[in-house]
Image: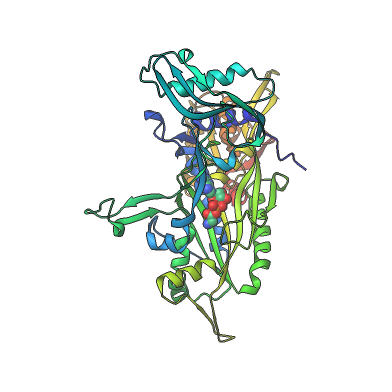
């Protein structure tokens, strides 16, 4: 069993650096200092993301008769999100550091123990300020650190901004012993404000004449893709002749004004979800939740996330979302800890009932066989596309020691991405760029494959270096056209090439005509 507490910040740093260096993921608006919590996928990252989405869609929509797709609008009517409970309750508890003004998620602060130094104010000559402040010192820390921090805090109220905080005299010092408190900033020990609720939705104004005050002009960027599935449930039912149980799937952007975006793309403010709302009879809800959990675990395995790195958390009562009667979180061992990849939730009939109630329009389902009318219950496997891409990149990254052709040891960086999600499926090289025949055949192979998959042609540098460049971006196959392809040394090998495998680095001889079926078989 893997250690769920294990973290490896150095490995994470290397992955982030490779992502930028090789064009997987860049910080959004990096040119202007970066837009916090937003990311841009580069030429290779976009391929991985598309491969993931296409495979998810194929498995969950194209290969199933009981699931259809939807692509709903991102801008969302405020009544939809009022009915769903997001306007009233989609919030996280937030607090501010009194000293640095950093904003923190109150429920994510690590409990700490130590001695709190309290003050009632500070003075300097004629000037004084009366405000309560406190600093937490952990065992062994010098009390002067508390005083220095407190002086820095009070100095911000002094009219002379160039005054040294050392000039301030602290007032009313007292101490208390604190155990497992979350009232202090773990970074600097400063007291935090009381936690208050912060709504995570991005609100916007619609229409040319819109103004902040006009409630009819308010719209939201959707915080989950699910709601348009619920509000279009009746339309899909009436137009697609689906019968319960059936599902509606959607892949699309969602937006949350996260208080602390962090861990690279893991917690972003703009991200993509891959969600299914699977409508069923009430008595089938719990069973289907278990079935969907297994289905989703198999999916992750099929894209290269091993079962032993996936963990299932049966979310306890009191910690589930307000709409859920049962939730499994599928977690993955990221280098920054074991964290949620997907939630499989039994949302009961909560959402459809709420939309029926708020819209005043019937959303019931009529069962032709039993002649019953009822509001279907729903099971929701909700995956994060960006989080899954991140998990794939983290799992794939490896540095291994190998010996080069001259017997010298070197470190090979290899992204062991599953061929299904790898951004480039095959790289094609002529052994010698000056050999016109090798170049011609290589180009022919490139053109014959590129209609079916993303391939890459490279003729620069020694072939060993070309292999290494492809290893680093996860290309599972390299095809080399050499003298044997031309049949110059052995006529039996004419029209064959070397197929080199990224993971084992083994090479085999294969007929050019066998390349396409062979590669298709590996990547589908
Ligand atoms: N419709 C249900 C729903 O949205 P959720 O647990 O809030 O449930 C589902 O989100 C999935 O969306 C998460 O498991 C995660 O993969 C992804 N997700 C949520 N918030 C995210 C964020 N801020 N950044 C990246 N992915 C996020």
Foreground: 303 or 88? 88
Left or right, residue 130 beside residue 286: left
Tell me where residue 466 sits by quadrant. top right
Left or right, residue 457 beside residue 406: left
> How far from the left and from the top, in percent, is residue 365?
51, 78
Residue 271 in the image: above or below residue 224: above
Judged from this view, the residue extending furthest toward the right is 1
| Count of numbered badges drawn on the protein | 0
Q: What residue appears at the point 63 percent right and 42 percent down from the top-left corner?
A: 510
Judged from this view, the residue extending furthest toward the left is 209
> How far from the left and from the top, in percent, is residue 92?
51, 47
Foreground: 141 or 217? 141
Foreground: 479 or 258? 258
Left or right, residue 29 beside residue 120: left
> How far from the left and from the top, in percent, is residue 371?
56, 87
Q: Is residue 341 visible?
A: yes
Residue 152 in the image: above or below residue 472: above
> How far from the left and from the top, in percent, is residue 441?
50, 38
Tell me where residue 403 sits by quadrant. top right
Residue 186 in the image: above or below residue 146: below
Q: Is residue 483 visible?
A: no
Name the quarter where the N terminus is drawn: top right
Foreground: 210 or 70? 210
């Amino acid at each position: 069993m893997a250690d769920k507490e294990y973290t490896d910040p150095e490995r994470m740093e290397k992955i982030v650096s490779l992502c930028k260096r090789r064009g997987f993921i860049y910080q959004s608006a990096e040119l202007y200092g970066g837009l916090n919590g937003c990311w841009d996928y580069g030429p290779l990252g976009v391929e991985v993301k598309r491969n993931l989405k296409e495979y998810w869609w194929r498995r969950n929509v194209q290969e199933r008769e009981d699931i259809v797709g939807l692509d709903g609008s991102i801008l969302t009517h405020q009544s939809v999100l009022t009915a769903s409970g997001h306007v009233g309750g989609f919030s996280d508890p937030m607090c501010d550091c009194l000293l640095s003004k950093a904003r923190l998620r109150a429920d994510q602060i690590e409990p700490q123990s130590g001695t709190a130094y309290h003050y009632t104010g500070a003075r300097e000559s004629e000037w004084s300020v009366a405000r309560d402040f406190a600093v937490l010192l952990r065992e062994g820390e010098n009390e002067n650190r508390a005083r220095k921090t407190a002086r820095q805090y009070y100095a911000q109220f002094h009219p002379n901004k160039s005054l040294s905080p050392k000039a301030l005299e602290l007032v009313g010092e007292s101490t208390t012993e604190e155990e497992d408190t979350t009232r202090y900033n773990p970074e600097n020990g400063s007291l935090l404000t009381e936690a208050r609720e912060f709504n995570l939705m991005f609100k916007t104004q619609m229409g040319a004449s819109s103004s902040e005050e006009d409630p009819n002009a308010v719209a939201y960027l959707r915080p989950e893709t699910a709601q348009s599935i619920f509000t279009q449930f009746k339309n899909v039912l009436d137009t697609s002749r689906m019968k319960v149980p059936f599902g509606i799937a959607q892949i699309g952007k969602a937006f949350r004004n996260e208080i602390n975006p962090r861990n690279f793309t893991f917690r972003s403010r703009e991200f993509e979800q891959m969600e299914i709302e699977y409508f069923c009879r009430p008595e089938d809800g719990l069973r289907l939740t278990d079935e969907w959990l297994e289905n989703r675990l198999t999916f992750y395995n099929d894209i290269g996330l091993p079962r032993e790195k996936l963990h299932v958390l049966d979310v306890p009562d009191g910690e589930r979302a307000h709409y859920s009667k049962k939730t499994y979180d599928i977690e993955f061992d990221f280098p920054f800890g074991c964290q949620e990849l997907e939630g499989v939730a039994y949302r009961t009939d909560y959402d459809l009932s709420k939309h029926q109630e708020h819209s005043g329009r019937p959303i019931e389902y009529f069962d032709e066989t039993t002649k019953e009318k009822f509001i279907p219950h729903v099971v929701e496997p909700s995956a994060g596309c960006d989080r899954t891409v991140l998990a794939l990149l983290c799992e794939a990254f490896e540095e291994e020691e190998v010996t080069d052709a001259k017997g010298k040891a070197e470190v090979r960086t290899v992204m062991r991405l599953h061929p299904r999600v790898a951004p480039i499926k095959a790289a094609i090289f002529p052994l010698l760029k000056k050999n016109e025949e090798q170049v011609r055949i290589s180009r022919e192979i490139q053109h014959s494959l590129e209609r079916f998959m993303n391939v890459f042609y490279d003729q620069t540098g020694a072939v060993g270096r070309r292999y290494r460049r492809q290893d680093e971006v996860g290309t599972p196959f390299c095809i080399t056209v050499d003298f044997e392809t031309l049949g110059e040394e052995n006529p039996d090998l004419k029209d064959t090439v070397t197929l080199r495998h990224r993971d084992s680095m083994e090479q085999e001889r294969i007929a050019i005509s066998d390349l396409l079926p062979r590669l298709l078989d590996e990547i589908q």
